[in-house]
Image (cartoon, coloured by chain):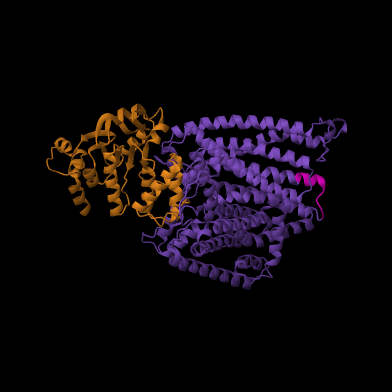
Amino acid sequence: MNWKNVIQLISVDIKSGRLIRGQRLRRYRERKFFQYLLYGGACLLGIVIGLAVGIVYSGVPDPDLKALFYQGAYSVFVSLPTLILIYSLVFTMMSQIQRAGVRASIQPPYWLPITWEEHTLASTVANLIGIPLASLILFSSAIAIVSIYLDVVPLAVLTIFALLASAYLASTTTEIFRILQVRLIGAVYKSTGKAAVWVRFIGTMLFLVGFYVIWFAFTSGTGSIALIEALAGAQQAIWFIPYIWLGMVVAAFGSGLLGQTVIFSLASLLFILILFYVAVRLNARFGLYEPPAITISRGVYSPKIGFFGKLGFSSLEAAVIKKDFKAFTRRRELMYIFIMPIIFILMPLMQYLGIYSGPVPSEASRFLFAWILLVPGAMMATMLGSMIIGEEGESVWLFFSSPITARNLVKCKYAFVTILSFVVMLVCGAIGILVARISLDIVVALLIESILLIFALGAVSLRAGIKGADFTEVPRPRMVRPMTAFLNALLCLVLALAIFSPLLLHAFAMGYFPITVPLMDDLPMTVLLPRIDLYVAVSISAVIAIVVAFVFYKIALRNAEEFLIKAEI
Amino acid sequence: MVSNEGYAVELRSVAKRYADIVAVDSMDLDVRRGEIFGLLGPNGSGKSTTLRMILGLVKPDSGSVKVLGINAQDDSVTVKRQVGYVPESSRLYEFLTGLEYLDFIGDIYGVALPEKKNRIEEYLEALELGGREGDMISGYSQGMKQKITLISAFLHRPKLLLLDEPLNALDPRSARIVKDLLRKLATQGVTTIMSTHILEIAQAMCDRIAIMYEGRLLALGNMKELRQKARLPGSDLEDIFLKLTGTEDVRDVVEALLK
């Protein structure tokens, strides 16, 4: 193993972050400060958290409470290696999905004198760079500081080593998964023929649903505590699973069982080496495997005017809309957008099912329905609008060199954003009607409100998407500048509240949400609010939404003109 | 068929800078209708910028660009409708099939349905892509992608072709078909401006050649005129190019490398 090669390969991967950060490429000067800001920030945050926890622990006067606190901290130490393993697995797999569309960023430089061992080691370490490494630093620094107050420094040191090993274990597993997945996909393409695109679409959706279920279980407040408690307790019972062994090392050391500590440490090391060997062998076998081309159609070519042509779009506009529909069902890195409505249905639904064992009460039912109907469509319009120009990637040269006017561009992209958001809204609305018992007038009002939100937020976000478009594709597609996306999300939130405020006023005044904020003279808020008729509220909403949509559509047109003129590709 | 009745492209005192780098320096250039025109020069000499200014993709800092009698900056969409463009490295929509991509291009340029079908089928057949047209472009070789890019440029029957390294990665048969097609189109009045580093192709195909260096036009003319300019009678384009661009120290460089 040539370590210099490994370090060089890892440093190339670190440098690929320059493109993600969108730095000036001509006369480029590396600014180490920004390169390491994420890790420095994570370390600082970890120290602050550690100090805060330590100070709270020191200030606890009751010895019983202190013991409880200590026991809690110990549970965290014991379960952290496994938690980090799950976390790193999810993150590294997600990163692989994002890179899947860009072959250049995952293909090894096979023409260089590099061995598969060197490539695999570099790839598995590089997988951890970014958020996983920053999280590791955050946890490690917090543990280190807390351990001083708890007087468990040796345990903390061992936990930190276990965390590093867990993250590497996860990354190696992802590497194996990635290679097998590429090979498997090839076999699936071959056997499924024309259905390959849909097999891939459904497969990716299932993977993403699984990812988010794990993610929410890990990150949601009560879920994470439950998970820590469960892991701390369950590890002993499932000790035979090699992925648990690093957690067992910490648990054994914490219990003073040195023999078990040594055995589990050696077993973990051996397991990592075996996984690494498997990854190297698989890379050597399938590392350069190219899945066969997907055949979509065979037979006679018969061009038609098509659905969008009949709707009144020009052939150019219809062609771009059709192309975008294909992009979002065929490009794996774009498919994640479809997971969003599923999440926004699952999240409140699971919560309500957890809270109410029987039927959901009518107030909660209204809120649940409003959420399911309004949020996924509005979120879809916001996200799609901001990425719909940047998703063109480097193929955008075609837009610049084709006879596409600003009007064509804005019209067809806006149409795509609103149509897809409508479809999502209708599907979600149908599910909402099934799970919540709602009167017809509220269904109609919320449906109109949802349509208005889609029109307005779609226009707002499209403007942001044109202004902040980013066509960088390697190492992963950026599509929109992060700051533009963030500011656009804030603006959309404010405008959505403004559009929805008349209906919100109606809901509060009618007492649909029984919030009784005590105001002057202890009068509940509902009494002070003016009663506003449902249809008046919807009409006011419509006026606000139409004005927002109109103004931002016009601004988008102006931005598109500048965009097409300044096409210095 | 080279026609002097109106130029296909007219550049007047055109200049373009990128920060402190001069890409094109006060260039005057006329390209006749029906001409196959070669634009040569070392890397970074301003060829691609010139092509992009002709298409209206890049706005010149000063000067004017007229394409087919239209000011490229004032009405770039009308210009683009009449131009077929092949960039040096084109990124195609890899999630589309070859057929879907060409259908998309046909719609973008507003080619009528029956014509679109006939032309796509003819080109696919001629460039031997028949049988793979239903596959996603992501599975195509570099040469196949270049064929799709070329068909995209020809599909709407443009009056002007702007080709940046058009024969890149093509197999000999397809390269020959493209060369013959360009000659045939020239006889029908279609103008071609071609940028290439393969000097043999430029010498064999182009009616006139312009040699650019550091943003300036060093020489312009047919082979006879270029030989006179370089004072190299009977020599080929490679020698002329190396002499005019001051890069004829090739032998010394090779010697130094072998030391």
Q: Position of residue A437 (x, y in %)?
A: 79, 48
- What colour do you see for chain A? purple
Does the segment drawn in magenta span residue A361?
A: yes
Q: Quadrant of the N terminus of chain B?
A: top left
Q: Residue lying furthest left in this view? A: B233
Q: Residue at x 54, y 36 (%)?
A: A411
Decide if residue A248 is in sight here.
yes
Along the horizontal axis of the image, is B123 left or right of A127? left
Labels in figure, total: 0
On screen, residue A353 above or below A37: below
> Which chain is painted in orange?
B
Observer-nearest of A550 and A466: A550
Residue A289 vs B219, above or below: the answer is: below
Q: Position of residue A535 (x, y in %)?
A: 76, 33
**B59 with respect to A469 (left or right):** left
Task: Please state if A90 lies on the left or on the right of B236 as rendered.
Answer: right
Magenta residues, start to end: A358-367
Please give left or right for residue A494 compared with residue A20 in the image. right
Which secondary structure type mostly characterizes the magenta part of the structure?
A: helix
Residue A528, image x, y percentages: 83, 30
Magenta region includes residue A23: no
